[in-house]
């Protein structure tokens, strides 16, 4: 993670000590025998399940995957790898996480873990219907089907694999982007606290269900600063009179994300106490992305207010087809108007390896 320059000057010894501690933690993690990564959620962690279902929300076409090995558009909503790909390779599992719906999964893919995530999905079953993506409930049903397949491959090692697997859950943004702020006339707009409870209730019961199936180690991402997503800023401008047009983060949406995140953290802490032998860690995407937005140069970013594909203001998924993309995506925080670049995902993965995984080992 990037650190403030003044602090560096004032406390070099402390900084060095922290750095050394972090290096030791990193070095320690692969030896802890994480058996697999099992992934649930939305486009931030979907390596291409949407390629196999009927939905308009796909990215298995140019310019997606431009910086991926062999420049293939796999269905990942980025120019390259996702956080979970970086984690799987750093943990010595496999170089990439496969989508569960891939018909070509090998026994070894099944043993080292797969992703059940689907771009466009949310914690509210209704949000997934808007994009015809795979809702969380269906992702859990696929996981239970997966357990049967794993049993055939791994036999009596299956329970060990599941209890030493890291479950990654990254979901919730779509419930805000499409259902709360979108055009659907949903009740949630008028009663956000109730809607937060509905979302968190669904998340809680999902984790309980994974725990009943033998899961013990969970990492759960909070919401990013939703008001700073390029598409959200564009939509806000379109709703304003011309003289008030100014492109900046929407504070109310960021406040909503922070409110949700603090309830989420409290819920995860209580869940860890309640679920036998469980470790449940929160991934603070909000602070990480805020740091990228306020100190872009620490990450090599030159552009943070629009995506690399097309104008960067509106385009995502099929709207990126046939438009010109920027030359060097590593200078951008966002790849399209919604999703981060591989460079941003790499920085998030580094944070998870250094500061989150040690909490659940
Ligand atoms: C990790 O796994 C290896 C091989 O499967 C085993 O030999 C070793 O004892 C395990 N280490 C821990 C800390 O469980
Ligand atoms: C979720 O939505 C699907 C259809 O998309 C429906 O079949 C299912 O019953 C719903 N489940 C709940 C709990 O609302
Ligand atoms: C809308 O709000 C209700 C709760 O009032 C919720 O159950 C439903 O799933 C919501 N979502 C959508 C996309 O309509
Ligand atoms: C199950 O475990 C036993 C010993 O505990 C072992 O001998 C046997 O080979 C294992 N079976 C499978 C299918 O792994």
Image (tube, rainbow, N blue to C red):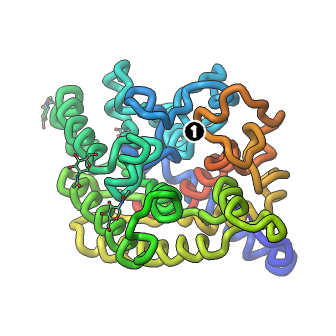
Q: Nearer the viewer, residue 43 or 186?
A: 186
Residue at (81% x, 45% y) in the render: 331
Q: Position of residue 195 (x, y in %)?
A: 37, 71
- The location of residue 82, given as percent across then percent down, is 56, 41
For residue 189, say whether it is visible: yes
Residue lying at 42% horizontally and 58% vertically, measured from the top left: 219
Query: Camera-side residue: 128 or 361?
Result: 128
Report x, y in % for residue 48.
Answer: 47, 32
Return the x and y of residue 25 as percentages of the image width and height: 55, 59
Give the residue at mark 1. Answer: 77
Residue at 25% x, 53% y is: 210
Local secondary structure at mark 1? loop
Using a 10 Å C-alpha cutoff, classify the residue at mark 1 as few (fewer than 14 neighbours), some (14 to 19) or many (20 or more).
many
Q: Quadrant of residue 247?
A: bottom right
State the residue lying farthest toward the front.
241
Q: Is residue 283 above or below residue 13?
A: above
């Amino acid at each position: 993670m990037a650190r403030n320059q003044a602090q560096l000057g004032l406390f070099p010894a402390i900084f060095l000590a922290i750095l050394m501690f972090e290096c030791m933690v990193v070095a320690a993690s692969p030896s802890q025998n994480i058996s697999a990564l099992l992934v649930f959620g939305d486009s931030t962690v979907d390596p291409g399940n949407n390629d196999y279902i009927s939905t308009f929300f796909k990215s298995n076409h140019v310019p997606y995957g431009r910086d991926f090995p062999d420049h293939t558009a796999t269905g990942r909503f980025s120019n390259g790898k996702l956080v979970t790909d970086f984690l799987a390779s750093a943990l010595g599992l496999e170089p990439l996480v496969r989508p569960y719906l891939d018909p070509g999964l090998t026994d070894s893919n099944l043993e080292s873990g797969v992703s059940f995530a689907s771009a466009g999905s949310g914690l509210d079953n209704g949000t997934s219907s808007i994009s015809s993506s795979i809702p969380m409930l269906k992702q859990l049903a696929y996981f239970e089907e997966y357990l049967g397949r794993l049993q055939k491959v791994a036999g009596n090692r299956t329970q060990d694999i599941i209890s030493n697997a890291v479950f990654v859950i990254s979901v919730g943004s779509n419930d805000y982007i499409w259902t709360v702020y979108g055009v659907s006339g949903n009740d949630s707009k008028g009663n956000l606290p109730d809607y937060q409870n509905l979302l968190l209730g669904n998340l809680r019961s999902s984790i309980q269900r994974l725990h009943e199936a033998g899961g013990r180690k969970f990492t759960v991402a909070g919401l990013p600063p939703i008001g700073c997503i390029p598409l959200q800023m564009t939509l806000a401008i379109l709703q304003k009179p011309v003289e008030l047009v100014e492109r900046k983060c929407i504070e109310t949406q960021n406040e909503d994300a922070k409110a949700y995140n603090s309830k989420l953290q409290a819920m995860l802490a209580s869940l860890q106490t309640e679920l036998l032998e469980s470790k449940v860690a929160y991934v603070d995407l909000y602070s990480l992305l805020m740091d990228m937005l306020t100190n872009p140069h620490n990450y090599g970013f030159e552009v943070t207010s629009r995506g690399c594909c097309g104008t960067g203001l509106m385009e995502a998924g099929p709207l990126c087809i046939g438009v010109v993309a920027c030359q060097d995506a590593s200078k951008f925080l966002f790849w399209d108007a919604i999703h981060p670049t591989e460079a941003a995902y790499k920085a998030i993965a580094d944070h998870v390896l250094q500061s989150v995984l040690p909490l659940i080992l």
